[in-house]
Structures are given as C-alpha cells and as structure tokens.
Amino acid sequence: MLRLVRPRPLSVLGLVLLVVTGACSSESARRDAPRGSGGSAGNATPGGAGGGRPVVGGSAGRGAVAGNGGSSGQAGAGTSGSGTLNGGGAGSNGGGAGGIPAAGSGGTSGVAGMVLPGGSGGEGGNEEEEGLGVRFIGFVSEDDGADLPASTDFLTWFPTCATETSTQYAPAPRFNECHARGIVRLMNDALAELIPNAPHFRFQSFEIIADERLAVFHSDPTYSGYELQHLLGSKYRVGNTMTFLMPSIAYGPVVGLTWTQDERLNPDFGMAAVAVPGGGTSVFLHEFGHGVGFPHAGNAAGVEPYDYPGCGGVTIEPPACSCEPQNFMWTGSSFVESPGCEPCAFTPETTFATEYFGPKFAEIAACWVTRRLEPSDIGFVDGDCFGLVDYSLATCKEMEGAGVTCACPSGQIFVVDDCTDAGQDARNAATSEACDRITCTPPPERPGVECKGLAGTPSIGCTCDDGVQHFSLGPDCSTLTLAEIERICPPI
Ligand SMILES: [Zn+2]
C-alpha cells in the first residue's frame, strides 16, 4: 500500500541520502565527530559484528546534528544522548546543522498503510486528553525475559514512577509507561516555555515489540541501513503523531536520531525519532527539538552558524563565549573551550529556553507550528530494503517464508536473498541485472553531465560535470536542457 503524500516526483537522491547519511552522534567518553556517510546504500555491520559497546543506563546524554555535508543537502539527522553503565559523561560530534533540500529534491512519500499491533489510532484508555499523540515503541530481543532498560537518570527525573529493575541490564531501571508520560510532560513544558499556544502533546501509547533486528541500534562503524529504514522510514510513522522508536541498547556512539528540519506533524505525516532510553531522558527532548527544527546549541567554535529556512528565516550565529549547556540542544562538543572565554561547566539539560538560543528556538518553534501542517520534503520508500542503481531504487519486501521480492521501477519483479545490510551489494547487482536502464544524452555544450536511472523511475538522477553536484530530472530525459544544467551545475 503506497499512498502518495505529494504529487511530486520521488527524488531518489533525497531518498538515498535519507536512508544512508546524516547523523550525528554522541559518545559517552570521547567527543567524537563521525559524520554522515554520504554515499551509496548502507553497509553497516549488522548485529553481532561486535563493534561498539552497549549503551545502557547511564547519565545524561548529548546530541549533535548531522552535518550531512552531502551535495544535495537532504536533511541531516540529529542524534543525541549517550551514557554508559559507567555513567560516562556526554559526548558528541559537532556536525553542522542538517542541510535543506536541494533543488530538485523533494519527493513522494510512501506512507505505509500498515496498522500497528495494538492499534495506532489512539483508542487507548486515556482518550479524554486532547492533543497530538506521542507513541513509544520499544524493541526488545526475542529472548525470554527481554526488557527495555532506561537510564538511571529516569529515577531522578521521574521519582514518583514505580520502577522495576531491568532483568537483563540491572541496575538500570526498566522503561515504563509512567516514564513515557513523564517525557511527554517534559516536551509540553519545554515547548510552552518557548512559545505561547504551543501545541499540546498527549501520551498515546507504549508498546513493546520483540524484534531481534531492531533491538540493538547500530551506528558504528556506520549506521545500519536496515535499522534506519525500519525505524525512521514510514513503517512506524503515523500521521499527526510523534513516535519514539526505542531500541533496547546501542552498539556504537549514537543513541538518538531524527531527520532534522523536515519532520512534520500533519494528517499525512508523522514525526519519528530513535531514542535509546539508556541514553537518558534528554535524548528524547533533544530529538524532539531536532524534529521541530532546532539545530545544536553551542558557541561559535562549537557549532556552525545556522540559517533556518522557514517563515522568513532565522539566523543563528552563536556567540564566541556563550555557555548554555542546560539547553537540551547542547552537545558534548558544542560549547568547546575558546580563547578568552570562561570554560563551560556541565549542567544537566532542563530547557530549550536558554539565553541566546531560547529566543532563536522560539522563532523556529513558532514557525514550525505553522509549517508542521505542510507536506514534508523528505520521502520514504515503502519497503523493507532496496536495490540501488544509478540513483534509482528497486523496492524490496520480505515475504513471510518466501524470501525477498523486489520490483524494478518499471514493475518487473525479481528475487534477492535477504534484506540485510550485508546483502546490499548483492541487491544492487541483482537490480542492475534485472531492471532496464535509461541514460540521457547531455547537450553538446556540457558533455560531462551524466543522467541515468532505471527505466520507469519517477526521477532520473544526474551528476554535474564537476562530479559533485547532483540534480534530478523527471521520468524521462526531455527536461535535460542546457538551461537546466546551467541553473544547477557550476560553470565550466
Ligand atoms: Zn543532535
């Protein structure tokens, strides 16, 4: 079931970036700066490969926006938070703020029509409360007794919640509905501090899904494309609803992730963020902030200046010496020591409304309240995985007990072995073999411009003659004109 959210061509460039790039991370001990790995489809090591360590129950975490640095500037992802059993401090990278959609990007969104087990419509027992629903979906392993651990900071934030100890990850507390309700309260409080008439969020549901493949969030050495597709794609998004996807633990530095600047909350679209509860309460608030459109808070040396594109724009030029680590959008590396400035002391995050960033975030939040009802610029592939050739996708679905079936954009069907990250190269090769291609002939003035795609693709991907810039055409070569090339590609 593919429902088109907007009648624009699906931008494969955007989709590819969406799936693969752009993340920021945080690490408990070190201030690391992994960047989004712009490039082709994912190749992360899936479970068991051993990289990284589990992040469970620790102190508060941090996040960072992904600079995606990518040429076509799909939204960067934000992440946040970390913490370990050792109670490590926060860490994170300092990427720039996520990019904005490039010319020609955009896309169709396929929102999966699936109905979640347990109901997605908010028909829970607390229907009396009005507002935008917030769903919490925890992913645990299929082992007996598996549960969802939270950071010990949940005990401090929500002291009145009756809390059991995780059986798997003692002494971490077990994440529960009371915690989820507490997070929604914090979201409301934090947003109301920024703007009057902020939309009200209400707790909608908390469910646990036993799914081995999503119980551990892998970000090291690179993100698992499979996990991103299933956690941040269309599968669990519900219109008008914020959904937190909560793997039990994280292997790798990243414990929170969302696509920044392009999250929407409208009937066709929902916000979604990965948040590993072991990373701490602030992970949820940090990712929510990115979803609204906030970049990282930091000083001039710690974060890049940022231009928010909506509502006439908001320019953020962080002061040299600011120190606002109590801001949820702080990251471990964003208030770095700067010459002539007092060093920043760590303070737990409690607010978005700090001295410099508060008013900026208030402007962004006020704009988001109007923009959140617009269609989103990001699109999602309605599939379990895909094959990638020339910036075009074949969408693949796992069939119960019957392998994985993929469809070329032209509709031709073929079969691949699996949907794992490790199988990506094989899926690409199978796609290349099974699907017909289109290659456009560039105008003689710019022979180096390359446009190609799979037959039937709604948008043919192009690379400028500089080999760097990308743009996309419609479904055929007719829109590849010299004027269009000169509009986008740097002069030669
Ligand atoms: Zn972040």
Image: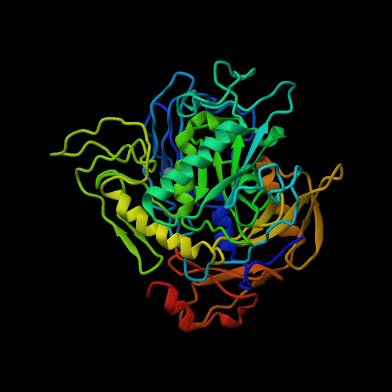
Q: Quadrant of residue 490?
A: bottom left
Picture layout, residue 52 above or below residue 464: above
State the image coordinates of residue 136 (x, y, percent, origin top left): 62, 40
Residue at image location 83% in from the left, 47% down from the top: 399
State the image coordinates of residue 105 (x, y, percent, origin top left): 53, 67
Left or right side of 433 for 327: left
State the image coordinates of residue 248 (x, y, percent, origin top left): 61, 30
Left or right side of 399 for 329: left
**Looking at the figure, which quarter contains the C terminus?**
bottom left
Residue at image location 57% in from the left, 46% down from the top: 202
Given the current orientation, which residue lies at the most extreme right position?
A: 401
Residue at image location 37% in from the left, 45% down from the top: 352
State the image coordinates of residue 408 (x, y, percent, origin top left): 75, 62
Left or right side of 29 for 110: right
**Looking at the figure, which quarter contains the N terminus?**
bottom right
Picture layout, residue 458 above or below residue 345: below
